[in-house]
Image (tube, helix red, strand yellow):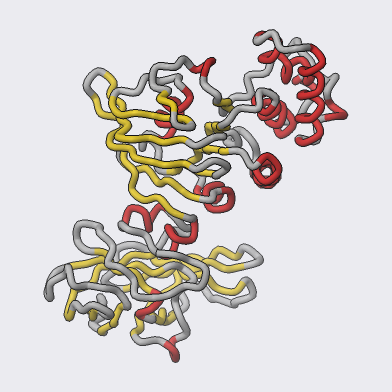
């Protein structure tokens, strides 16, 4: 079992608030990813779950039992750190078995668990090697294996892939996802990399300023962010934002005036807005439409084109918009330097945020994605 409940969790350091009002219910077997900008409190929250940081406020329960005062070594929790922290003089097998030996587990049981973990992590052929003879990805698998042999109720991962190069990170993401499917164990994973969050998580917990900004399935946060802060963090490239004026707020559609003067009816519930106030329109890079299909248009000029092979990212300047806007195009799209382009907008493919950053609820249905 690995049902974890956090109620009103908070953390202070000498009166400085780090985390506050964390309420979270993590089901047995769920893969949850904590993500957010640097300093948002995600690693601190993970360390409180592990017992490495004292909880200042609130209650944490594992399978119904309060664990606030239980020391780390007595919690049914295993942690994989950013640093591999392998003993250089020990073999892979000895590193993986070390915690069980300290716990005075039966020798036959230790051998059995190490063998099972090594097979899962494709380490069987490497058991007699020492860390200096391993690649970065292999060392990380050994670190995971060291936790795996303990068979904890909850696995914690603290940015485990940040020391690997891009190719190895992709490979290890796949292996961690496969491991979760095999074990069906509860896993909590901390990262600042939103690609890891989107590809691994059953649910994402996006933290900002020590509080939970939004919890939900990855595509739910992507298509239905509750705040501008969430919308700007989730998605690569970052969501495009431009200033607009509210003209006619409504329940199903809200008319706004674009920087060029055109009107666009955005498919959102704008009843919390008032005519004349300023708001922010959000458009994902892939959500611009062809000019002949658009409900409104923005003249733009190409600044830089990133030709990535499978796609081209066009970075564009629009009059009246301070930030550069990005449009995702087919990889074979031909563009000239400083070329004039037209960005087409469709109200159903846009987001609208009030002046305080609160999202107006989108009035669209996306198959397979819940609000």
- Pinpoint residue 125: horizontal percent, then vertical percent: 87, 29
Disc count in the image? 0
Q: Outermost residue, front direction?
A: 64
Q: Residue at x 60, y 36 (%)?
A: 161
22 or 138, which lies in front? Answer: 22
Q: Outermost residue, bottom direction?
A: 292
In the rendered image, which quarter contains the C terminus? bottom left
**Left or right, 41 with reference to 119:** left
- Pinpoint residue 179: horizontal percent, then vertical percent: 69, 41
Q: Residue at x 58, y 52 (%)?
A: 199
- Pinpoint residue 59: horizontal percent, then vertical percent: 34, 28
- Pinpoint residue 268: horizontal percent, then vertical percent: 29, 74
Compared to residue 278, the image places residue 207 above or below, namely above
**Residue 238 occupies quadrant:** bottom left
Compared to residue 299, the image places residue 17 above or below, namely above
**Left or right, 150 with reference to 159:** right
118 or 7, which lies in front? Answer: 7
Residue 223 appears anywhere in the view: yes
**Left or right, 15 with reference to 197:** left
In the rendered image, which quarter contains the N terminus? top right
Q: Residue at x 59, y 33 (%)?
A: 160
Residue 168 appears anywhere in the view: no
Q: Residue at x 71, y 43 (%)?
A: 182
């Amino acid at each position: 079992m690995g049902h974890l409940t956090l109620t009103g969790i908070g953390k202070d350091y000498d009166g400085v608030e780090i985390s506050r009002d964390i309420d979270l219910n993590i089901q047995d077997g769920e893969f949850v990813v904590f993500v957010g900008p640097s300093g948002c409190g995600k690693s601190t929250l993970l360390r409180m779950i592990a017992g490495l940081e004292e909880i200042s406020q609130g209650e944490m329960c594992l399978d119904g039992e309060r664990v606030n005062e239980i020391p780390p070594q007595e919690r049914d929790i295993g942690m994989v750190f950013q640093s591999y922290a392998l003993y250089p003089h020990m073999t892979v097998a000895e590193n993986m078995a070390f915690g069980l030996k300290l716990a005075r587990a039966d020798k036959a049981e230790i051998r059995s668990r190490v063998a099972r973990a090594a097979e899962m992590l494709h380490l069987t052929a490497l058991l007699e090697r020492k860390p200096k003879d391993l690649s970065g990805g292999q060392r990380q698998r050994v670190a995971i294996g060291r936790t795996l042999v303990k068979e904890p109720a909850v696995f914690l991962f603290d940015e485990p892939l940040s020391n690997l190069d891009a190719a190895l990170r992709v490979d290890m993401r796949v292996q961690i996802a496969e491991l979760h499917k095999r074990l069906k164990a509860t896993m909590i994973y901390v990262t600042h990399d939103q690609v890891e969050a989107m590809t691994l998580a059953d649910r994402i917990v996006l933290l900002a300023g020590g509080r939970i900004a939004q919890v939900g399935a990855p595509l739910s946060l992507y298509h239905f962010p509750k705040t501008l802060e969430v919308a700007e963090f989730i998605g690569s490239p970052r969501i495009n934002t431009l200033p607009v004026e509210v003209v006619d707020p409504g329940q199903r559609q809200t008319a706004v005036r674009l920087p060029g003067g055109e009107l666009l009816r955005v498919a959102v519930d704008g009843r919390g807005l008032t005519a004349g106030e300023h708001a922010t329109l959000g458009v994902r890079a892939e959500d611009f439409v062809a000019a002949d299909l658009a409900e409104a248009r923005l003249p733009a000029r190409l600044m830089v084109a990133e030709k990535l092979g499978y796609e081209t990212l066009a970075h564009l300047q629009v009059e009246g918009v301070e930030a550069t806007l990005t449009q995702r195009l087919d990889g074979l799209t031909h563009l000239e330097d400083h070329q004039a382009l037209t960005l087409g907008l469709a109200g159903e493919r846009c987001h609208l945020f009030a002046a305080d950053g609160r999202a107006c609820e989108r009035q669209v249905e996306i198959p397979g994605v819940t609000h």
